[in-house]
Amino acid sequence: MKVKQRSVSKLPEIDFSNLGFGKYFGDHMLLRRYEKGAWQESQILPFEDIPLSPANVTLHYAQSIFEGMKAFRGEDGIVRLFRPEQNIARLNRSAERMAIPLIDEKKTLEELIALITLDQDFTPPHIGSSLYIRPFIFATDPTLGVKISETYNFMIIITPVDAYYGRSLQTVKIFATKEFIRAAPGGTGHVKAAANYAQSLYAEKIAQQKGYRQTMWLDGREHKYVDEVGTMNIMFVINDTLITPSLEQGTILAGITRDSVLHLARDLGWKVEERRIPF
Ligand SMILES: Cc1ncc(COP(=O)(O)O)c(C=O)c1O
C-alpha cells in the first residue's frame, strides 16, 4: 500500500469541545480503485476532494454502499475498534446485493488499521465521543447507461464525532409511519445501500415537522409490524423479556449493536425473543 502523508496536520483546527457529527475529517483517507476487472493497490492519501465526471453513474443511479463504525479511546489512552471485521463482512454483503465487486476482508481490515493508526490522534478522549469511520464503495463509470459499472472507488474517511444525539444521553422521540415504507421483502433493506437513506429522507422530514427526531418504519407489506428506526435497530423490554424484530423478512439491517446487545443479554441469562412485533 502506498502512503502519501499530509505535510501539515489539520488537528489543531479541531474544536474537540464541540465536534458535532461529520464536521471535521482526519488528515488522511484510503482509496482503492477497481478497474480492468480487479481491485488495485490501495493508497493512503491526504484527505481532499476527488474529481468526478458529471456523468458519474453513482450520481444518477445510486450504485453505492457504505459502512459506519467507531474507534474509542479507552481510559488507558489506547484506541480500540469495535468489532470492525463485522462491518467489513457486512460491506461485502451490501456489495453482493448491489452488484459491486467484493473486497478482500482480511486485507481491508489491515489497511483500515493502518489508516486509524496514522490518524489516531483524531480520536476524541471524552466519554460518548468517538472516531467515526466511514468505509464506502461507489461506482465511477462516466456513462449514462443503466448498467453495472466497470469501475469503482473503495474509500475510507474518518471523522471525530460527539454522540449522534448530542453529548447528554437523550431519549429520541420516534414517529411510526403508516404512509411510507423503508423496505420490502426482496428489496435492499437488509444492506447498507446509499439509496435506502435517500428515499427515507422525505418521511424523516415529515416526522421532524411533527416534532419527532426519527421515523419508526413498519413492514412494507402490511404496515403492521415493527421493522426498525431511521438509523438504528429497535428493542423492547416487555415484562422481563428483550424483544426485537427478527432478520427473517430480509427488510432490516443486521446491526452490529443489535447483535452485540443480543449476545450480552443471552450471556446475562435474559429472556430474548427475535420475532415479528405487531405495532
Ligand atoms: C437503518 C439502520 N439500522 C440499524 C443500524 C445500526 O447498525 P449498527 O448497529 O451496525 O451500527 C444502522 C446504523 O447506521 C442503520 O442505518
Image: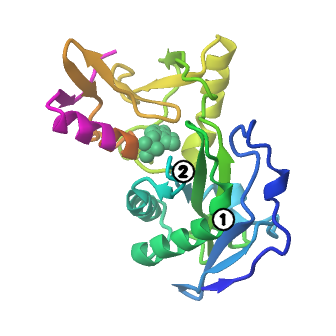
- The disc labelled 1 sits on which kind of residue? Asp
Could you say where residue 207 lies in the image, as x and y percent from the top left?
61, 18
Which residues make up the magenta segment?
260-279
Q: Is residue 102 magenta?
A: no
Which residue sits furthest front?
76
Q: Amino acid at mark 2?
A: Arg
Where does the image place residue 105, in percent across and percent down from the top left?
41, 72
Contact between labelled residues 1 and 2, with CB atoms less than 8 Å apart: no
Where is 180 relative to 85, above or below? above
Q: Nearer the viewer, residue 144 or 15?
A: 15
Query: Which of disc 1 and disc 2 is earlier in sequence?
Result: 2
According to the picture, the residue beneath numbered tag 2 turns out to be 73
Residue 128: x and y, percent? 56, 36
How many neighbours does mark 1 have within 10 angstroms: few (below 14), some (14-19), or many (20 or more)? some
Looking at the rendered structure, the secondary structure element under dot 2 is strand
Closest to the camera, between mark 2 and mark 1, is 2
Q: Residue 39: name its quadrant.
A: bottom right
Residue 253 shows up from this direction: no
Q: Quadrant of the N terminus?
A: bottom right
Q: Which mark, by number, is residue 119?
A: 1
- Residue 92, image x, y percentages: 42, 64
